[in-house]
Amino acid sequence: MNPALALAAAPHGFLSPTGVEIAFLLVGLVTFGAALITVTTRQLVHAALWLVVALGGLAVEYLLLTAEFIAWVQVLIYVGSVVVLLLFGLMLTRAPIGRSPDADSGNRRAALAVALAAAVALVWVVVDAFRTTWMDLSGPAAGATHVTGASLFRYWVLPFEALSVLLLAALVGAIVLSRKAKADDRAGAGGTTAADGAPAPAPAGKDSAR
Amino acid sequence: MHLVYPAVLSALLFCTGLYGVLARRNAILVLMSVELMLNAVNLNLVAFDVWLSRAARDTLHSGQALTLFTIAIAAAEIGIGLAIVLAVYRNRGTSDIDKLRDTAERPDGAEPGPAAAEKTEATA
């Protein structure tokens, strides 16, 4: 029996996939396709919308991996806020609606070569290392909210609090970066329009500027 | 489920993001590609955490905790990144990263003509 057949006839063979595996594969194909369109389309707003598909597909993958809390966090933060921020950014930089001819830079071929080489190397190594590894998804969910919360607040409290400080610093930094300098305000003859503010921190920035 | 499926999907998504970062010209599209790369890492972390929580009886759930931290850091990163892109757009009138060449070395001390002209035009 050659090794491929032995691999297929093993207790968890690749030729007899379970339902979860089939679902994972199909959603994975959709996710990967959406990601490919995101990085190749010439319409900037469409790129952001295809990014929604890719991130939503990843949330479904988390659900299939029984990490439900991560899945809902993914939906809330990525699909809910990050993509909205990106769309705001596209609008505020007056991105062209429709096809823009210069969405890709001149080093496309080099980028393609690098990405393909990295993909081949990574997939080869990963498949070689983990082709017989089997995850047991039965039993209580490994990523249920109870489990995640217990581990987060039992073992990871200090990083969690440090992360809240980091978020505060990022908030302050975004405000500082997005408000205009005072001297710039005086020099520009009434130049501050509402469209010049940054997306999320704009109201806070205006408050602190008052 | 075989661990290979999520691992391969995450590798492919990472390389897609890598291509986007290298090939895109608009700064916001580059940020989108960075998000794709971060999400690939998240998928890897979650998959290995689910595997280890059964195979090695790991109760620390470090993969899921790190995934949550990565998501939070990615949110902070996108906020700061967009603020920087908007500041650059306000000063230069473009979010095209190929045109931001002020710190590039120029051969034989050529005048930074077009960039300076563009800057004055944007501020005028």
Image (cartoon, rainbow, N blue to C red):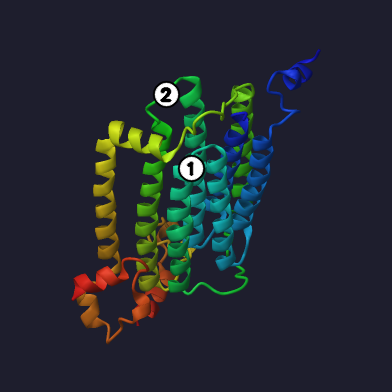
Q: Residues within 10 Å of mark 1 (few under 14, many from 20)?
A: many
Which of the 4 image quadrants contains residue B78?
Answer: bottom left
- Quick one: which residue is furthest to the top in this view? A1
Q: Residue at x 43, y 33 (%)?
A: B63
The disc at residue B58 is 2
**Chain letter, disc 2 residue:** B
The span from disc 1 to disc 2 (Cα, nearest Å) is 18 Å
User: Against A206, is A158 above or below?
Assistant: above
Q: Closest to the observer: B86 or A199?
A: A199
Q: Amino acid at mark 2?
A: Asp
Q: Amino acid at mark 1?
A: Glu
Residue at disc 2, secondary structure:
loop
The verdict on a common chain for dots 1 and 2 is no
Question: Residue A104: x percent and y percent?
Answer: 59, 60
Question: Residue A82: x percent and y percent?
Answer: 44, 58
Q: Closest to the observer: B59 or B44?
A: B59
Residue at disc 1, secondary structure:
helix
Q: Residue at x 69, y 38 (%)?
A: A22
The answer to whether A91 appears left or right of A202 in the picture is right
